[in-house]
Amino acid sequence: MAGLSALTLVEAGEGAGQVGARLVMLALVALVAALVLGWSVLLPASLLLVGAAYALHLYVDEGFDVKAPLFAAGLLLAAELGYWSLEEREHVRSEPGEGLRRLAFVAGLTLAGLVVGTVLLAAADLARAGGLAVDLVGAGAAAAALLLVVLYARRQSG
């Protein structure tokens, strides 16, 4: 969570930086309270506050940030690790190797989130650039969707 906070505040302007710093401090207090007291309701609140600080930075300072997929993957990782920490408070016996399997799953999920975020950011940048290439990609996607509908309808009728 500290890394996400730093990513949010490092490039923030003066106005967004001051408000963002307050939001991040509240987020860290909420996260510590959630983990120490076991109050799971505070975990999403802390993630929401860090996300709000990042959104404020994007709104005030820059509208398009290439680090957005990294931030999103970090937010996903923080949520998974936070809930995992809360689950570990219950002292439930697990089978050997379950922790490693879960760690691999969380790492894979985070990596998948990073890849999907990067692809979506690239698509948004392409759409923002506009031009003939975007029109051709859009027309191709529409044609592919129509083809899928036709194939599905033929399959259902015959």
Image: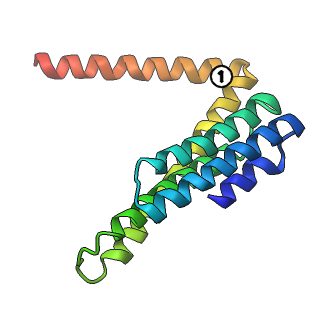
On the image, the x and y values in percent for residue 18 come to 82, 41
Question: Looking at the image, can residue 81 be seen?
Answer: no
Specify the amino acid type for callout 1: Val
Nearest the viewer among 124 and 25 is: 25
On the image, the x and y values in percent for residue 32 come to 55, 60
Label 1 secondary element:
helix
Q: Which quadrant would residue 62 be assigned to in this image? A: top right
Q: Which quadrant would residue 156 be assigned to in this image? A: top left
On the image, the x and y values in percent for residue 93 come to 23, 78
Colour pattern of the rendering: rainbow
- Which quadrant is home to the N terminus? bottom right
Q: Residue, x 60% and y 42% (percent of image)?
A: 49
Position of 56 relative to 89 (above/below): above
On the image, the x and y values in percent for residue 80 come to 44, 58
Neighbour tally class for label 1: few under 14, some 14-19, many 20 plus, Cα within 10 Å: some
Question: Looking at the image, can residue 123 be seen?
Answer: yes
Q: Is residue 49 left or right of residue 38?
A: right
Q: Is residue 78 left or right of residue 8?
A: left
Nearest the viewer among 88 and 3 is: 88
Q: Residue, x 35% and y 75% (percent of image)?
A: 99
